[in-house]
Amino acid sequence: MLIDGDREFLPVLQNAFLNAGVPKDQIRSYHDGSAAVDALTAASAHAAPSVESTPSFVLIDLELPGRSGLEVLQWLRGSSPLRDLPVFVLTSKGTADLITRALDLKVRSYFLKPDAFGELEAIVEGMLAHWFRRSQGPMDQAEPR
């Protein structure tokens, strides 16, 4: 699940995931923190969540309309069925306070948005490789290159 507050950056981020081999039908994207929480709530409401309903991980921007990225993280960590969902931060602000707060909420990694698409692709591929190693099993999509 991709959650990013920048409407112009979100399609660029989606393209980086497509280029890394993630099928389009497995990329769910949200611009608003509240909409993302609604989608995550619906996914976790299933008695036996399916692979299709529950995201494998979340990549979140901290600057979101609706609920902020930190508010979404706090909600996620307090949500019993999703509290252990892997979360990565990709945002434009990297103050010590924000990084500390995100790490306190158990994000896997904190990345600053790069200026170049090639750098974004490297971040996405590294994140997918990290997730794949941690999951110790096949993803629904192909293993990252």
Image (spheres, grey):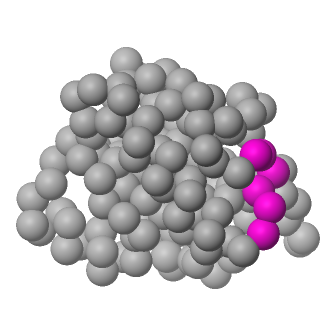
36 or 92: nearer the viewer: 92
On the question of residue 5 being in view, the answer is no
Left or right of 4, for residue 38: right
Q: Is residue 81 magenta?
A: no
Left or right of 93, for residue 54: right
Quadrant in which residue 46 is drawn = bottom right
- Residue at x 58%, y 63% (from the top left corner): 131
The magenta segment: 137-142
- Residue at x 19%, y 74% (from the top left corner): 100
Magenta segment's dominant SS is loop
Rendering coords of residue 137 (x, y %)? 78, 69
94 over 124 or under it: above or below: below
- Residue at x 61%, y 74% (from the top left corner): 134
65 or 117: nearer the viewer: 117
Rendering coords of residue 122 (x, y %)? 41, 42
Rendering coords of residue 66 (x, y %)? 39, 42
Quadrant in which residue 101 is drawn = bottom left
Residue farthest toward the left in the current orientation of the protein: 96
